[in-house]
Amino acid sequence: MTSNSFDWTSTRQLSPVQILLSFVIPSGIAYIGFHSVLPNLVQGGMPVLVAWPIVASAMLAVFAFTAVLLLKNEAAQLGISVAERMCLKRLPLKQWTKYIAVMIAGLMLAGAVSQMVGPFIQLTGIEIPAYMPFFLNPTIDPMNAGPETLSPGLALEGAVFILPLFALALLLNILAEELYFRAWLLPKMSRYGHLAWLTNGLLFALYHTFQLWLFPVILVGSLIWAYVIYSSKSIYPALAGHFVGNFIFSLLGLTMLVLA
């Protein structure tokens, strides 16, 4: 860890158009991946639970690699370490306690907001594509759904080989989102004050156009992560929360289904 002397205002600030493009470009890439490449693979006979992590990993690896290059380049320009520019700032226990409490409250709020997803889908008329995996479809109850609903074209029970595929996709998701959207992009919006984290959270939620039916829940999480990083000037709390919520719990749930 590093004590981090990185002053967010020292980095080149982005204009509103540049900020918008910074979200729109990766969103467009993700939309093509999940709504063009993914369905083509599934229609070609590849099981959804194999195709999805492959497509996700390929795109997220590009996003994460791009973020590292951008952060490394700017660290050199500012004369600071890459770790400092990555916002890997060490936090005292008191701050950890504060931000953990904020994130727990955010997760509880997201859980409550999840009840709005059904009405949101009905109100907007958004359709959930059949080629999306079951865990991205809130209308499917994994505990009560049949095997073919959970994993079309693949016997989920005993399919241990999909676990490393999902582990890779989930880890790359954490790295791409925290390094690009938060560590690189959020400091470059800091001149806008508290509007920076609010805008970052909203645009990050809208980045998920490829699964817009989950917008209410994603928005809550996006705002929480953006606030925590903006307030702490460190991505460590969000990394920890993201790792527990999006990696451990997700992979544990999938493992239970595979080994049932």
Image: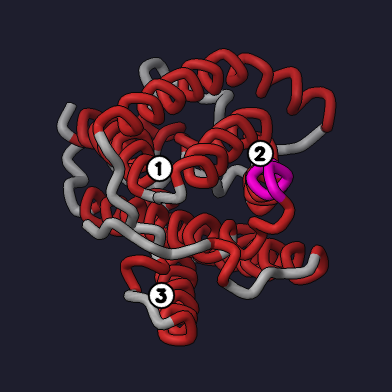
Determine which residue is flagged by label 1.
238
| Mark 3 vs 1, N-terminal side | 3
Determine whether, in the image, residue 16 is placed left or right of residue 200. Answer: right
For the residues labelled 3 and 1, the Cα–Cα distance comes to 17 Å
Observer able to see residue 180: yes
Q: Is 125 located above or below residue 80 in the figure?
A: above
Q: Which image quarter is the N terminus in?
A: bottom left
Which corner quadrant of the image does residue 118 belong to? top right
**Which callout, 2 or 3, points to the residue nearer the camera?**
3
Q: Is residue 20 magenta?
A: no
Name the residue at 21% across, 45% down. Answer: 159
Q: Which residue: 45% across, 75% down? A: 71
Dot 3 lies on which element? helix
**Amino acid found under the numbered disc labelled 2:** Ile
Q: CA distance from mark 2 to mark 1?
A: 28 Å
Front residue of 10 and 27: 10
Q: Earlier in the sequence, mark 2 or mark 3?
A: 3
- To which residue does mark 3 refer? 68
- Near-viewer residue (211 or 36): 211
User: Is 145 left or right of 168, judged from the image as shown?
Assistant: right
